[in-house]
Amino acid sequence: MYILSFESSCDETSVAVTKDGKYVLSNEVLSQIDIFKEYGGVVPEISSREHVKGITYAYLSALKNANLTMDDIDYVAVTEGPGLIGSLLTGINASKIVALNYNKPLVGVNHLSGHIYAACIEHDIEFPCLALVISGGHTELVVMKDHYDFNKIGSTKDDAVGEVFDKVARIIGIPYPGGPLLDKIGRDGKAIYHLPRPVLNSKDYSFSFSGLKSATLNLVESLEKDGIKYEIKDIARSFEEAVSEVLLKKTKKAIEEYNIKEVVVVGGSAANSVIRETLVSGIKDVKVTFPHLKYCGDNAAMIGISAYYKIKKGEIDDITLSPKSRLDL
Amino acid sequence: MYRLVLDTALDYSYLGILEDDNILYESYELGKNNHSETLMPKLESALKDNNITLKDIKEVYVGIGPGSYTGVRIAVVIGKMLAVMNNITLYTFSSLFSLVSNKTFECYAFVDSRRGNCYTAHFDYKDSKFIRLTEDSVEVIKDYFKDTDENIIIKESKPNPLVIINSDLIERVEDVNSLSPNYLQLVEAERIKMGLK
Ligand SMILES: [Zn+2]
């Protein structure tokens, strides 16, 4: 089964062709990151405009790189939410007109499920599976007893992991997008500062990172006020280890309670090396899987993989599909 | 030959299917924020009712703005996609021109763009044809129109697809991939970055 998929929920215009919910034949990603470096963050209206500009190029390129024509495609899939409404609209309208033009069934995909299914690219996950979704917009723990059976057991009460990475990066003077650069700088740093581990010992699976962000800001301000020399790499590393420890602890707790066989760590922040190392070395008894780095950020391939399993469940949408800025799993 | 005419930039959503110089189907629907939901099902049933498919359409004409940022993107994305999928010719027209296209006299197209501003363009009508007197622009309403006869300021009117496709005021798109709507205004963040107000 060949699926053509669209993703335009935030600042990447992406179209992909995937096969059988497992193989990526092409995955064109037009990133707007260079534009938003100048703004220090995503500007929704600029993002919407860029999607319109890039959509036909991404579509043509995805088919060409897959070496297929629309005759070979069985389904058209698209991210229906959550995301920026103006951005989602371009992917939705493009996918609808493709579906209508070639008379193909249309499948709307939840962006979060897309991130989770990035772990299924050339890989079979074992159930019960625990997905830790960490990105600029999300921090969630999801238990899956089977394909397309999502049980969200916890999420962040305030900032998402990727969001707090960007904010802390700004505090220590690292330009947007802070996450990847903070990762690089933190690699040589030492965790010599103790920062709080919010909700580390709470009974539930919720997260909270805004306190950690404030604590980092206070730390930097007091070091500066006292004239104490510090290196941003040590701040970065101390912060990363605080985040990683909270993620590890909650993940381990869920592994026990839900008898988990495999943990998949997905989303843009799953590319962070300290988070990766902490989770891999801290979880001994079950398999820990990360998608390939190129499938951690937003991309259409993961939407096509997820769509495959939605189709297997018999869930198909139609041309009335509309974008949803908020959408639960 | 079948042609498709779309304009979703203004308060209305317009969809027309033409066969040569006849209007086979048209829909003109007022309502600001649901263009995206209503347009595609309408297109699907219009095609079905007339026993044609999108592959029969040989030319697409889309309104390129100015108007609602979200609205204008719908027709432009559909137009771009149809052009590349079916290898057909894409034309664009100003949504301000489509607004006056059913008139037969000198007039101004007027679209409120909030904060006392409007999008406008001035058209003359001679020998059964529209001539553009001013480019699409953003103007302060009370200054720009203070001496203008209210009767020639057109705020709401159904587009005339036959006038549009036969006009000199349409543009054939050579580079479909890089086509963007004519927003006419920078995004606020762009203005701030450039040091404008
Ligand atoms: Zn994402």
Image (cartoon, coloured by chain):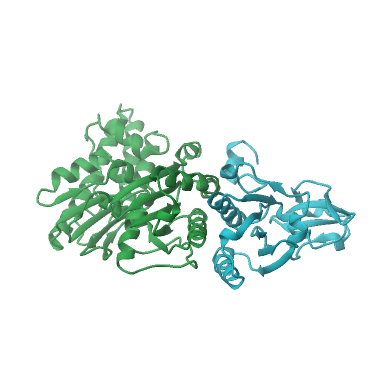
Chain colours: A green, B cyan
Does residue A124 appear left or right of residue B185 in this picture? Answer: left
Does residue B161 appear left or right of residue B127 in this picture? Answer: left
State the residue in front, B79 or A221: B79
- The quadrant in which residue A30 appears is top left
Q: Residue at x 30, y 55 (%)?
A: A21
Quarter that holds the C terminus of chain A: bottom left
Is residue A154 among what the camera can see? yes
Relative height, residue B186 to residue A5 (above, below): above
State the residue in front, B65 or B143: B65
Q: Position of residue A282 (x, y in %)?
A: 14, 46
Is residue A82 among what the camera can see? no
Relative height, residue B85 to residue A271 (above, below): below
Q: Position of residue A98 (x, y in %)?
A: 49, 57
**Total number of numbered labels?**
0
- The quadrant in which residue A304 appears is bottom left
Q: Position of residue A66 (x, y in %)?
A: 38, 45
Does residue B168 appear left or right of residue A217 in this picture? Answer: right
Quarter that holds the N terminus of chain A: bottom left
Q: Position of residue B110 (x, y in %)?
A: 76, 57
State the residue in front, A92 or A67: A67
Q: Residue at x 42, y 67 (%)?
A: A317
Relative height, residue A92 to residue A35 (above, below): below
State the residue in front, A155 or B74: B74
> In the image as oriented, which residue stretches furthest toward the left?
A285
